[in-house]
Amino acid sequence: MTELRPIDAVLLMSFGGPEQPDEVLPFLQNVTRGRGIPDERLVEVGEHYYGFGGKSPINDQNKDLLKLLEAELASREIDVPIYWGNRNWTPYLIDKLREMHAAGHRRILGLTTSAYSSYSSCRQYREDFGMALETLAAEGIDLEIDKIRQYYNHPGFADAQVDSVTRALDELGADDRARLVFVTHSIPDPMQAASARTTPGYLAQHEALAQLVAEQVAERTGVERRWDLVFCSRSGAPGSPWLEPDINDHLEELADAGETSGVVVVPIGFISDHMEVKFDLDTEAKATAAGLGLPFVRAASVSTHPAFISGLCDLVEERAAQLRGETPAMPSVTPLRAEGPGSGACSAGCCLGRVLKPVRPQWAES
Ligand SMILES: CC1=C(CCC(=O)O)c2cc3nc(cc4[nH]c(cc5[nH]c(cc1n2)c(C)c5CCC(=O)O)c(CCC(=O)O)c4C)C(CCC(=O)O)=C3C
Ligand SMILES: [Fe+2]
């Protein structure tokens, strides 16, 4: 059997989403508690969910991911159970941790469903862990949780993107005036600044990966295409600065400039086709492009791509080796500096939110 010591269970840790219409509102309240999101925005986002029957696609995608991870680990003869827990909806993290403890697990490795550094995508998950462990400790339940590094620069993530962009270009019937439009979730400027404190930061990480994917796709197709990094799903108060441009504004600019024959929209910031992808890209941005007469194909997210699944399992093995005191190779496809102590994830003081909360793992400041 291959070694995963000291880890005795893996936890797929995700955002969560509603399963039916009456869960939409309480889910949105969970997500936005204390976040200062205007009511109008909540109503609007609620409509996105109701438009899809009140069910987020994210849970089924996580169930599929879990099965594929189980199969890949089994094929590597790694005998470790995988559980699934969420921040904002059932199955909630804390319930899953109780279940894991009751099953005898003590050293858990978190595998989070977000690839980049930012409060939302890294530190907040570490706070979820930290706060759950404090609650459990008060009940006399002792557990330790670590997590894999942020993996935007892992070859498995990059290879899957290159593959799906190449396929999308085929589907578009792209000529050399077609353009790659990489899209990620917008975040507030202060959240971006906090992410860049001890890592290259959310924005630079996306730029580095987009650049690399564009280069590798150019090598594969023999055509160098222009590319942009744009944003979707802005929320917050209208006056507060968030990362721009919005994808819809960007498509209008491309159409106005008249030099683009079509776009492949690449959801580089999302690991699966959850609501932002289904609504903001496949519904809204697609309609914008249609209105502009701009041919539009959305590239597949990495979701179940074999290179991505295999990469995630490599990351699990890498972190376990680090926890044993070994120094495994930490493959990275981008030239950015390594991030954070040991794990390559955000370090202790990175991506701070507005309130200081307990975090796990609790790495020393680098
Ligand atoms: C960087 C990032 C990721 C990617 C990394 C990761 O995956 O973690 C992500 C993922 C997701 N975000 C999701 C849903 C929502 N995010 C919201 C709000 C916000 N997201 C933010 C950022 C991110 N979000 C931010 C800065 C806010 C403002 C509030 C705040 O400052 O924290 C809101 C409230 C309404 C609104 O404001 O839009 C909802 C409903 C879902 C589930 C989708 C589904 O159901 O399929 C997923 C996977
Ligand atoms: Fe979000």
Image: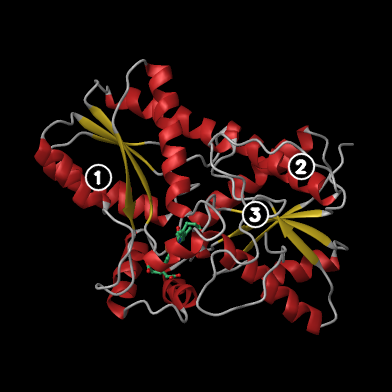
> Which amino acid type is marked by label 1?
Lys
Colouring: secondary structure
Verify CB contact (< 8 Å) between mark 2 and mark 3.
no
Upstream in sequence: badge 3 or badge 1: 1
Q: Is 304 or 263 nearer to us in this picture? A: 263
Q: Is 195 or 58 nearer to us in this picture? A: 195
Q: Is mark 1 within 8 Å of ligand 1?
A: no
Residue 286 - label: 1
CA gap, disc 3 to disc 1? Answer: 38 Å
Q: In which quarter of the image is ligand 1?
A: bottom left
Mark 2, residue position: 317
Mark 3, residue position: 340
In this image, 111 relative to 59: left or right?
right
- Element marked by disc 2: helix
Q: Is 355 or 44 nearer to us in this picture? A: 355
Q: Where is residue 232 in the image (x, y as percent from the top left)?
A: 33, 55
Quarter containing the N terminus:
top right
Q: Where is residue 218 in the image (x, y as percent from the top left)?
A: 38, 22
> Which amino acid type is marked by label 3?
Gly
> Which amino acid type is marked by label 2?
Glu
